[in-house]
Amino acid sequence: MKSGVKVRISKKFTLYIPKAIAEAVGIEEGDFVKMWVEGSRIVLEPVPDPFDLALRGPKFARTTFEEFEGESEEMQDELFG
């Protein structure tokens, strides 16, 4: 069995994540997590914020404003004629 931190579930089934655990996985107040059941275990996984990921995440391509604008105009022509 893995070691961990023992926490208590409140009357309204609220679970408070200890600060050390939250910091270890990089979650902060207001962040979202996915939760599911695997057998008798409850699993939580941080959900990255798409906006934060776009600003601070790894970049895999470069584009100019002109290229972006051209793509936008093409898509608008396809959608709206």
Image (tube, helix red, strand yellow):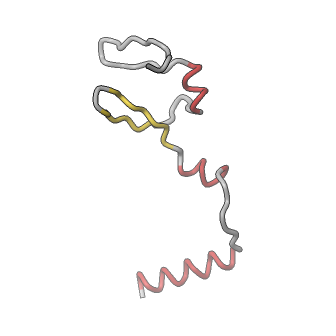
**In the drawing, does residue 59 fall left or right of residue 6?**
right
Where residue 2 sits in the image (x, y, percent)? 47, 20
Where residue 80 sits in the image (x, y, percent)? 41, 83
Where residue 26 sits in the image (x, y, percent)? 59, 33
Q: Residue at x 35, y 14 (%)?
A: 9
**In the drawing, does residue 15 fall left or right of residue 18?**
left
Between 58 and 52, the one nearer to me in the picture: 58
Residue at the far front in the pictured view: 1
Q: Is residue 54 above or below residue 70?
A: above
Q: Is residue 19 above or below residue 64?
A: above
Q: Is residue 70 above or below residue 19?
A: below
Q: Residue at x 53, y 51 (%)?
A: 50
Q: Residue at x 64, y 51 (%)?
A: 57
Where residue 39 sits in the image (x, y, percent)? 28, 31
* Quadrant of the image occupied by residue 33: top left
Q: Quadrant of the C terminus?
A: bottom left
Between 81 and 74, the one nearer to me in the picture: 74
**In the drawing, does residue 75 fall left or right of residue 54?**
left
* Quadrant of the image occupied by residue 58: bottom right
Between 26 and 73, the one nearer to me in the picture: 26
| Count of residue discs | 0
Between 25 and 55, the one nearer to me in the picture: 25
Q: Quadrant of the N terminus?
A: top left
* Quadrant of the image occupied by residue 6: top left
